C-alpha cells in the first residue's frame, strides 16, 4: 500500500460547491477531452506540458467571421496576422480557408512566401522593413503599408533606383476615444500628417496608392472605436478620389477584436463582457456603406483579425510539480508551465480546468510556474479543487500570442499538437532539445 504523505494540519476556510462572485460554479468541472481526444492520452503520448490546437475550431472561427462580414458588406477579405500564431500548419489552415497573409517583418514575409501565399496577397505592415524587404515586396506586388516618412522616402528612392512600381497604402493612427492613444505607428489623422503622406505618394512617379490602413489597438472592447476609424479612413479615401481622381481599392481596418479571455483585474469574465464580432461588423459596415461611395467604387474591406480567430482553438495541458504552503498559509500549486510558455498569463486570467475528477473541496490558491523567477505566476488567485503532485490541468484560450512570444528561459519549449478535422493528432512543432538550442553556439578555440 502506498504511504500517504504527511502534510502539517492547518485550519483554512473551505468552499464546497459554492458559487463564486459571478454566481457561477468555480472552475472545478473536469475537462477530459479536447474535441474527442482524451487529455490524458495526449499527455501520455506527447509529454507535459503540451500545446494543443483544434483545426476544427480554427475553421469554425474563420468561417463564422467571414459569414458575419459578408452578410453585411459585399467585398470582404481577411488576412491572417502572422505574429499572432505563425506555426506554418496554423497559417496554412487560414490560407486554405481563403485568408491572405499579414506580416510585420522580413522573416514573417518569407514565412508567408514559404507557405505558398502569392506575393500580391501579402500585406506588409510594421515600422521595420529593411531595404531588401521593400525591394522584394515591390517585385512581388505585395501590399506595402508605409509606417513613417523615413520608410516613404526609402521606398521612393528604391523605386527610382530599381525601377519598381510598389503597391502601397499608409497606416493611419487617430483618436478613437481609446486611451492611451496608439499613435506610434503610422501617420496621424487629426494633425494632417496622414493627408500629407497621401499627397506625397500621389505626387510621386512610381508609388501606386491602392489602400488606406489602420490598426487602432488590440483587445478592443469598443465597437464605436471601429466606427470612428472606418469613418476617418472613408474620409481619406473620399478626398483622394475628389482631389486626385484616384479610386482607393481597399480600406484595411486591421485587427484588434477581443477574444473571450478575461483581462486581469476585470470584474466580470470575458465571455460576459466582450462584444461579439457581429457588433464590430455592424459598426464598421454601417459607416462604409453609408458614406456614399458609388457602388462600383465601394472599397474592398480588409480585416487583419488575429486573436479573436485563434485564441479559443488553443489549449495548454500541464501537470502539477508540487504543492506547498506559503508563509501566510496560502496554498501554492507549482505547475510545469509558466510565463516561459504562457506569456499571456501576464495580461489574462486564463481559465484553468482540472483534467480529472477531483474532490469537492475547493480552496483559493496561487498557481506558480516552474521558473526560478519571482514573477513566474500563472494565476495570482484561483479557486480550484485541491490539486496534488501529478494531477493534470487544461488551460483554455491560449492560441494567440503564446506560440510566438514564448521563450526558452530555463526550460525548453514543448510539443505542439494539432487535432485535425477527423480527430487525428499531428505534432506540428517538436519539443526542443539541448542540441537544437545549442546549434548556433560557437566555442572559441581557447575554451575547447
Ligand atoms: C498584431 C496586429 C494585428 C492582429 O491583432 P489582433 O489584436 O490579434 O487581432 C493586425 N494588424 C496589425 C498591424 C498588427 O500589428
Image (cartoon, rainbow, N blue to C red):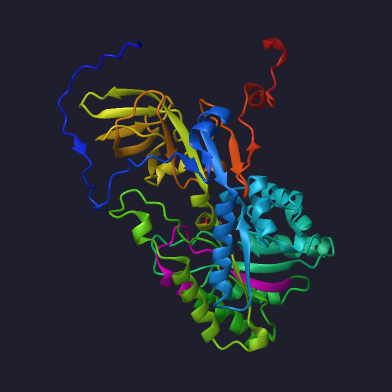
User: How far from the left and from the top, in percent, is residue 27?
Assistant: 33, 43
Report whether residue 193 is seen.
Answer: no
Q: Residue at x 39, y 47 (%)?
A: 348
Q: Residue at x 28, y 33 (%)?
A: 365
Q: Where on the picture, by quarter, is residue 298?
A: bottom right
Q: Which one is in front, 178 or 277?
A: 277
User: How far from the left and from the top, in percent, is residue 228?
Assistant: 46, 75
In the picture provided, is 46 more to the left or to the right than 444?
A: left
Q: Where on the picture, by quarter, is residue 428?
A: top right
| Highlighted range, magenta | 208-229
Q: Residue at x 56, y 89 (%)?
A: 292
Q: Quadrant of ligand 1?
A: bottom right
User: Was residue 17 drawn as part of the magenta stretch in this picture?
Assistant: no
Q: Where on the picture, by quarter, is residue 179?
A: bottom left
Report whether residue 137 is seen.
Answer: yes
Q: Which one is in front, 161 or 294?
A: 294
In the picture provided, is 23 more to the left or to the right than 113?
A: left
In the picture shown, does residue 174 fall above or below 134? below
Q: Residue at x 45, y 35 (%)?
A: 339
User: Was residue 219 drawn as part of the magenta stretch in this picture?
Assistant: yes
User: How far from the left and from the top, in percent, is residue 194?
Assistant: 57, 72
Q: Which one is in front, 379 or 356?
A: 356
- Give the mark count: 0
In the picture shown, does residue 55 fall above or below 138? above
Q: Which one is in front, 34 or 94?
A: 34
In the picture provided, is 65 more to the left or to the right than 164?
A: left
Amino acid at each position: 500500500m502506498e504511504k500517504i504523505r504527511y502534510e502539517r494540519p492547518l485550519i483554512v476556510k473551505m468552499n464546497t460547491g459554492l458559487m463564486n462572485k459571478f454566481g457561477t460554479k468555480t472552475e472545478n468541472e473536469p475537462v477530459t477531452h479536447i474535441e474527442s481526444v482524451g487529455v490524458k492520452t495526449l499527455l501520455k503520448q506527447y509529454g507535459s506540458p503540451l500545446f494543443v490546437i483544434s483545426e476544427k475550431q480554427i475553421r469554425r472561427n474563420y468561417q463564422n467571421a467571414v459569414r458575419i462580414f459578408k452578410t453585411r458588406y459585399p467585398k470582404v477579405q481577411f488576412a491572417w496576422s502572422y505574429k499572432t500564431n505563425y506555426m506554418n500548419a496554423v497559417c496554412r489552415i487560414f490560407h486554405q480557408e481563403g485568408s491572405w497573409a499579414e506580416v510585420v517583418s522580413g522573416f514573417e514575409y518569407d514565412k508567408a512566401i514559404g507557405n505558398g501565399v502569392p506575393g500580391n496577397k501579402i500585406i506588409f505592415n510594421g515600422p521595420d522593413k529593411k531595404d531588401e524587404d521593400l525591394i522584394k515586396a515591390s517585385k512581388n506586388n505585395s501590399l506595402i503599408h508605409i509606417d513613417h516618412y523615413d520608410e516613404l522616402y526609402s521606398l521612393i528612392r528604391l523605386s527610382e533606383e530599381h525601377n519598381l512600381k510598389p503597391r502601397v497604402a499608409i497606416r493611419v493612427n487617430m483618436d478613437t476615444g481609446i486611451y492611451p492613444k496608439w499613435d506610434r505607428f503610422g501617420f496621424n489623422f487629426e494633425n494632417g500628417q496622414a493627408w500629407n503622406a497621401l499627397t506625397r505618394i500621389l505626387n510621386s512617379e512610381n508609388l501606386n496608392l491602392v489602400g488606406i490602413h489602420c490598426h487602432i489597438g488590440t483587445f478592443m472592447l469598443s465597437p464605436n472605436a471601429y466606427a470612428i476609424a472606418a469613418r476617418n479612413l472613408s474620409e481619406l479615401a473620399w478626398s483622394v478620389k475628389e482631389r486626385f481622381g484616384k479610386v482607393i481599392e481597399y480600406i484595411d481596418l486591421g485587427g484588434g477584436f477581443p477574444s473571450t479571455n478575461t483581462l486581469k483585474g476585470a470584474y466580470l469574465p470575458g465571455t460576459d463582457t466582450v462584444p461579439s464580432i457581429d457588433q464590430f461588423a455592424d459598426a464598421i459596415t454601417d459607416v462604409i456603406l453609408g458614406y456614399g461611395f458609388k457602388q462600383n467604387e465601394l472599397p474592398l474591406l480588409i480585416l487583419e483579425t488575429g486573436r479573436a480567430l485563434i485564441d479559443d482553438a488553443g489549449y495548454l495541458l500541464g501537470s502539477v510539480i508540487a504543492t506547498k504552503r506559503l508563509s501566510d498559509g496560502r496554498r501554492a500549486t507549482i505547475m510545469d508551465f509558466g510565463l516561459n510558455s504562457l506569456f499571456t498569463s501576464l495580461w489574462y486570467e486564463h481559465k484553468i480546468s482540472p483534467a480529472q475528477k477531483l474532490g469537492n473541496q475547493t480552496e483559493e490558491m496561487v498557481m506558480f510556474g516552474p521558473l526560478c523567477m519571482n514573477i513566474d505566476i500563472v494565476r495570482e488567485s484561483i479557486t480550484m479543487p485541491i490539486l496534488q503532485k501529478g494531477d493534470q490541468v487544461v488551460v483554455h484560450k491560449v492560441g494567440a500570442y503564446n506560440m510566438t512570444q514564448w521563450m526558452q528561459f530555463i526550460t525548453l519549449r514543448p510539443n505542439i499538437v494539432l487535432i485535425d478535422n477527423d480527430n487525428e493528432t499531428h505534432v506540428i512543432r517538436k519539443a526542443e532539445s539541448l542540441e537544437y538550442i545549442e546549434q548556433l553556439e560557437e566555442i572559441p578555440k581557447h575554451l575547447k
